[in-house]
Amino acid sequence: MDIILSVSALITFFFLFSISKRLIQNRKNLPPSPPYLPILGHLHLLKKPLHRSLTTLSNRYGPILSLRFGSRTVLLISSPSSAEDCLSKNDIIFANRPRLLAGKHFGYHHSSIAWASYGPHWRNLRRIATIEILSSNRIQMFSAVRIQEVRSLVKDLFRDSELGKSVVELKSRFSELTFNVMMGMIAGKRYYGENVVDLEEARRFRKIINETLRLVEASNIGDFVPVLGWMDLGGAEKRMVRLVKDRDEFLQALIDEHRSRKEKVDFSSLMEVEVEEEEEKKTFLDVLLSLKETEPEYYTDQINKGLLSALLAAGTDTSALTTEWAMSLLLNHPDVLQKAKAELDLLVGPHLLDESDLAKLPYLHCIINETLRLYPVAPLLLPHESSEESIIGGFYVKRGTMLLVNVWAIHRDPNLWVDPTDFKPERFQDAEGAKAGLKLIPFGHGRRGCPGASLALRMVSLALGTLIQCFEWERVGEEKVDMTEGPGLTMPKAQPLKAVYKPRHTMLNLLSQL
């Protein structure tokens, strides 16, 4: 009898606790939320591409929206004011990352800079990235790598054209360009095109990159419905484990190679000029190995591999896609292309574009800003997670809520932009774009903002400007370039860009000397 009474009391306690908890929550001003299904929540409402599907929900229910992705509570924001609340006023609260399968495997159990939650470890990684690797001085030191790779692309296009019109598929060319640039800065190597020293190593690298892009772009239902994650339907986790093992071995071989080479250099026997030359030749990997000498217990090979992986993930495909979107827009707007060409002819003159010229090309920068507004390659940014309760736009947000910032929706909001879906680079020459603030956040904002934004802008500006300077560009056929967005977190084009080009007559002498 006593046992029955005890069980009854326990059941009554939990029932009353559940009721009281719900009553307390109901008194709080929660964000609006559409009706949802048990277990799935709002997942059945989501279509591809995700940023458009979420924009439809925000247009119906408001710019601050609470969603259920399976077992996870998600805060969706789609306005500059709510973005400021989350990424400025409550920046530290929303500086965590949710625990997702990609972070577990690709982020070394959530310890890499992209996936680590806010704290001393992440702050130290951020310091390394911004001061030791991606500082203005360090980026400038690798200017020659970027110029060399861009001119190598131009040389290949010039040779393929045979001085007449030719058709080129630009998506793969831009991808190869950005990977060669990044690997040149990371390890002093190139894996695409000519002058590839180790063909087998290059083949292995390309295979790892292609498989990584496929897996990262795929959504994982197990992140939101745990029982499906345990079952690993489709084998996504198995493929991740296998890929990460291959990637880890590849990066470890690079580290070991650079460590061995570094140990063979006797700096004590070098003259001061030779030491300076060695410093100038330092790659990102050399910098990380130098840091390891100061704190070997912290700068482990795993920490370094995490940083290298983040550089490859954030600094390659994103820049390639932005360049492809920009060129697509220019082909659909030949008047803008002509204006950019005139600016280059007037302000750069009779030499190939150099990074030192970029500062005097304001219209080129307007084109890139407008491209990033219309086609941000991280339309939802990387997800954040709240570490404490907070008030966002007057609404209560509980601890552990996943935050999605719909940058794509903000960038196309008709209340913020005049003719928001039109390609108008000139808007960044006047008041509308001059002080865009959180109306334009393609690289995120606050502590979790992208530390490589400056490098990305240099890369895209140099590549796009050089191609405009050196060649005449036209669409393939009479129809406009298809601007349909493909599925994926980085918003690729559904159809890879193809274009007709020929060398500009005024550039023939310079191109023939490459």
Image: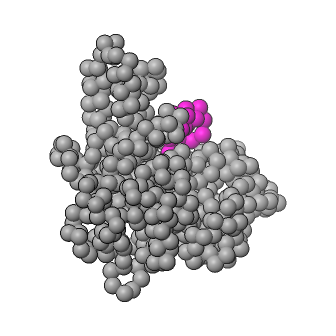
Residue lying furthest bottom: 478
Looking at the image, is 257 positioned above or below residue 77? above
What segment carries the magenta color?
111-130
The residue drawn where x is 20% and y is 47% is 195
Residue 170 lies in quadrant: bottom left
The residue drawn where x is 26% and y is 30% is 257
The answer to whether residue 234 of the structure is visible from this angle is no
The residue drawn where x is 67% and y is 43% is 92
Residue 271 lies in quadrant: top left
Q: Position of residue 252 (x, y in %)?
A: 30, 34
Camera-nearest residue between 461 and 472: 472
| Residue 65 drawn in magenta | no
Q: Position of residue 110 (x, y in %)?
A: 48, 42
Looking at the image, is 498 positioned above or below residue 388? below
Looking at the image, is 514 positioned above or below residue 471? above
In this rendering, position of residue 324 left or right of residue 440: left
The residue drawn where x is 49% and y is 40% is 134
Q: Position of residue 60 (x, y in %)?
A: 67, 77
Q: Name the quadrant of the C terminus.
A: bottom left
In this rendering, position of residue 76 left or right of residue 461: right
Count of marks placed on residues: 0
| Residue 114 drawn in magenta | yes
Q: Position of residue 160 (x, y in %)?
A: 21, 66
Residue lying furthest top: 268
